[in-house]
Amino acid sequence: MTLNELKYIVAVARERHFGRAAETCFISQPTLSVAVKKLEEELGLSLFERRKGEVSVTPVGEQIVAQAQRVLEEASSIRQIARRGQDQLDGPLRLGAIYTIGPYLLPHLIPQLADRAPKMPLVIEENYTASLAEKLKRGELDVILISLPFDEPGVLTMPLYREPFVLLLPSSHPLNQKASFQVGDLRNENVLLLGAGHCFRDQVLQVCPDCLRRSTAEGSPVQTLEGGSLETIRYMVASGLGVTILPCSAAGADRFSERLLSIRRFDHDAPSRTIALAWRKSFPRPQAITALRDAVLGCEMSCVEAIH
């Protein structure tokens, strides 16, 4: 068996389709199919069940594909180990970030990292936590920025900072007249939420289960208002559609006139999240992780609390 054959079966298992797998490997489908069949004959078993328009992995195939992924990663590590005499900060770093972190941290992070590691440009991908975790495990990303808790086998995490949540509401909203308020005060408000799949939505609902209302006190149904991004939600709040809870870095105090928006902190037991780095234990460039951590902690984000 060859590393290319292992690469091909991992691609087929991921795509569940020989044609798409061939495209991701930049070869023709017949070439990929012949290579996979050759490996199956060498192993004396079928790795895939082939049906019209669909491919599934056999139970033993799942185990072999998982081992093949580990072998490919170890082979990649050999190249990195060979470069250890060189600078670990010389070469791109593939960074993933969840949607509610990237737009607000990266403008501060990029210049900080450029000062510390000028020969280490970032290849950046934004995605949901689950997608980033899969790409990290497959070796398609080197390190990801996520919100804790995050627990994956073979993955290390490093907390970076705590970020309190704040309330964003129209400047004319009656809640602005309250001297203090808590999350419970939102139970009768139209609270705008991110759509399903965003971990921040789940965190908001943990601290404010009443924010997802199904009916009014009178029993009338209530439509839950959702946005695809924090930016979209902020625009809807500015237009007077409702209120929302945001991470403090996303509140955008400087982006709208005070005539439109008001930002309020919670007075007691303010909810928060912890932002962390996550990377594979086998990642061979620990100095790159350290440089990234130092760059994040060097960012000027006044509303967060660094974890040293």
Image (cartoon, rainbow, N blue to C red):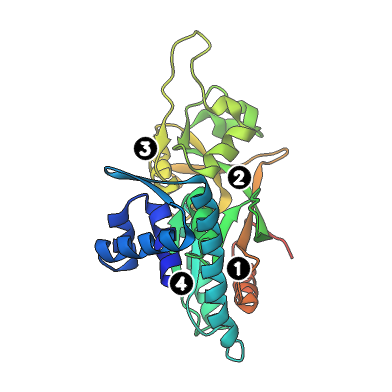
Q: 40 or 93, which lies in front?
A: 40
Image position of 57 with respect to 242: above or below: below
Query: Between disc 1 and disc 2, whose residue precedes?
Result: 2
Q: Which residue is mark 3?
A: 239
- Residue at left 64%, top 50%? 148
Residues at marks 1 and 2, CA–CA distance in whole angstroms: 19 Å
**Which residue matches tag 1?**
296
| Inter-mark Cα distance, 4 to 3 | 56 Å
Residue 300 drawn at (x, y percent): 59, 67
Q: CA distance from mark 4 to mark 2?
A: 47 Å
Q: How many angstroms separate mark 3 from mark 2 (CA)?
A: 21 Å
Query: Where, by quadrant of the figure, is residue 224 drawn?
Result: top left
Q: For the residue marked with disc 3, what is the amino acid?
A: Ser
Instruction: Say which label, 4 or 2, has the lower sequence index.
Output: 4
Q: Which mark is residue 164?
A: none
Q: Foreground mark, 3 or 2?
A: 2
Residue at point 51% right, 65% down?
A: 139
**Lower position in the chain sequence, tag 4 or tag 1:** 4
Instruction: Give left or right: position of 211 versus 42.
Output: right
Residue on which the image places disc 4: 3
Q: Is residue 159 visible?
A: no
Work out which residue is located at the far top of the displayed protein and give it: 218
Of tags 4 and 2, which is closer to the observer? Answer: 4
Which tag, 3 or 2, sits closer to the chain's start?
2
